[in-house]
Amino acid sequence: MSGNNLAQAIKTLALEMGFVAVGITRPDPPAHLDVYTDWLKQGCHGEMEYLAEPRRVYLRSQPGELLPGCQSIIVLAARYAAPPSISHPPPRFQREYPSPPAPLPGGEGRVPHPQPLSQGERGEESPSPLGRGARGEGSQGNEDVFFGRVAAYAWGEDYHNILRQRMESLMQRVQEIIGRPIAYRCFTDNAPILERELAQRAGLGWIGKNTCLIHPRLGSYLFLAEIFTDLALPPDPAFVPDRCGTCQRCLQACPTQCILPNRTIDARRCISYLTIELKSAIPPELRPLLEDWVFGCDICQQVCPWNRRVAESP
């Protein structure tokens, strides 16, 4: 089977397995590594020291090192449910705690997955460091019921497991097609990779002003995943147009003003970082700006016109 035919077969299989977009690129060094290294030098990664470890920075500069003999990178996207628009926020969730929970632990580019939260009736609201708290009818003694919003990507099952299973199934099918073993490695948000740059190089979209990868038809509510392989596949053309234009909605809507002009984020002010990755106490001056977000944040995606187009499309 020719390289072009095999690439098309892989894309067809990927779509059949539930991915919504797929592209192919080479394991070349990233063109914009300087943006990342400058971001680290400015300390915008906050307490996520693992991002600045020399070995991980090196691997981001040489993605092919993650798989000896790597010739191609298959970049995949899967959609997750977009929340309602910012003018119609999603329902709040509640959970009872004897005291406010400690920040959840993080890992190498990997966000810990929260346990499902049960929906409950809203009680009388009172201030809380985790958002708007309330004492529910079912609470006992001094236990409080804390209400808050969770980012849309975390509403379902753990995407790391689901996407890895899909990628493994995909590569098993490809090996059956070509009749020989293939060297490959599967990743999704769990390796030192500049995922969005790879996705743009593979033609899946552009990196928006809110730093998300935006697909022109699917918006930005996307999980990204990558398969590094020794297969020699023809690369897709990169997505070159910047379709954010003069829009500034994400920058204007961010409560903490963490979005920087060069399409990076100052994590030290980002609600997602403050509610997931930060191990120390949230700075007092930022606490009121978190409103009722308790795990992640969707504001910069909710206001994006490209996501509104997706929501309004039939």
Image (spheres, helix red, strand yellow):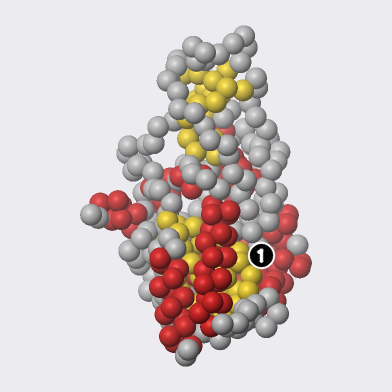
Would you place residue 295 above or below residue 9 in this image? above
- In screen coordinates, is 47 left or right of 96? right
Would you place residue 314 above or below residue 213 in this image? above
Residue lying furthest right in this view? 54
Q: What residue is shown at x 45% (from left), y 68% (from top)?
A: 14
Residue lying furthest bottom in this view? 2
| Residue 53 at x, y percent in the picture | 75, 62
Residue 209 visible = no
Q: Residues within 10 Å of mark 1 (few under 14, many from 20)?
A: many
Label count reads 1
Q: Name the residue under label 1.
A: 192
Element on which disc 1 rests: loop
| Residue 101 at x, y percent in the picture | 65, 29
Q: What residue is shown at x 66% (from left), y 37% (from top)?
A: 103
| Residue 203 placement: quadrant | bottom left
Residue 111 visible = yes
Q: Nearer the viewer, residue 259 or 274?
A: 274
- In screen coordinates, is 258 left or right of 141? left
Would you place residue 73 above or below residue 114 in this image? below
- Label 1 amino acid? Pro
Residue lying furthest left in this view? 314
| Residue 45 at x, y percent in the picture | 65, 54
| Residue 193 placement: quadrant | bottom right
Q: Which of 288 and 118 is in front in this view?
A: 118
Q: What residue is shown at x 47% (from left), y 35% (from top)?
A: 149
